[in-house]
């Protein structure tokens, strides 16, 4: 069986900090190192979203790129770009998700899939914090 996948990338700049509010500052530093610093730090992220589905015989596409671009703009770029993730994205506030690459990738996969509905399947999301660190969340076939 042939599977067709399309990969679209977007970029956003954001600050974050790893911290568990119920832990002391010392414990946070011991577990999260420099990522626990109280004044946050930032990255220019690259987010790659892979969708899969049948190729429409009329358009030759898995998904209308304008639709995918609108969803990625709303669910990724508008939500995260030039934001402090801990302070401005409620799901990542103190006591919520820690804004690791792994959690960001899973969060984005879920949000994009919900926005796209059942017409196409989000196969994976990769979040690159920089050229040396990436997180990849993949759904099994």
Image (cartoon, helix red, strand yellow):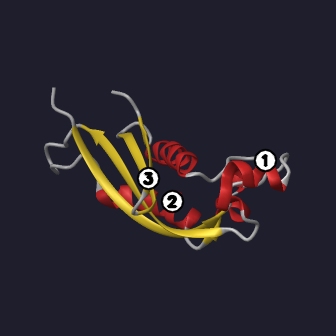
Q: In the image, is 113 to the left or to the right of 6?
A: right
Badge 3: residue crowd in 10 Å (few <14, some 14–19, many ≥20): some
- Residue 98: x, y in percent? 67, 49
Residue in the image at 39% along x and 63% along y: 131
Q: Extreme bottom residue here?
A: 82
Disc number placed over residue 95 in the picture, else none: 1
Q: Mark 2 points at which residue?
A: 76
Q: In the image, is 18 to the left or to the right of 115?
A: right
Residue in the image at 57% along x and 64% along y: 80
Q: Mark 3 points at which residue?
A: 134
Which image quarter holds the N terminus?
Answer: top left
- Residue 118: x, y in percent? 41, 36
Residue in the image at 63% along x and 69% along y: 41
Badge 1: residue crowd in 10 Å (few <14, some 14–19, many ≥20): few
Q: Is residue 10 above or below residue 91?
A: below
Which sits in the foreground, 68 or 89?
A: 89
* Quadrant position of residue 14: bottom right
């Amino acid at each position: 069986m042939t599977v067709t996948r399309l990969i679209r990338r977007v970029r956003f700049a954001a600050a974050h900090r790893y911290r568990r509010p119920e832990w002391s500052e010392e414990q946070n530093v011991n577990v999260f190192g420099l990522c626990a610093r109280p004044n946050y730090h930032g990255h220019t992220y690259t987010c790659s979203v892979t969708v899969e589905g049948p190729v429409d015989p009329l358009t030759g596409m898995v998904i209308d790129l304008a639709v995918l671009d609108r969803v990625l703009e709303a669910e990724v770029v508008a939500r995260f770009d030039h934001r402090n993730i801990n302070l401005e994205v409620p799901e990542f506030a103190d006591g919520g998700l820690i804004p690791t690459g792994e959690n960001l990738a899973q969060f984005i996969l879920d949000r994009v899939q919900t926005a796209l509905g059942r017409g196409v399947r989000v196969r994976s999301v990769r979040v690159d914090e920089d050229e040396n660190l990436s997180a990849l969340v993949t759904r099994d076939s």
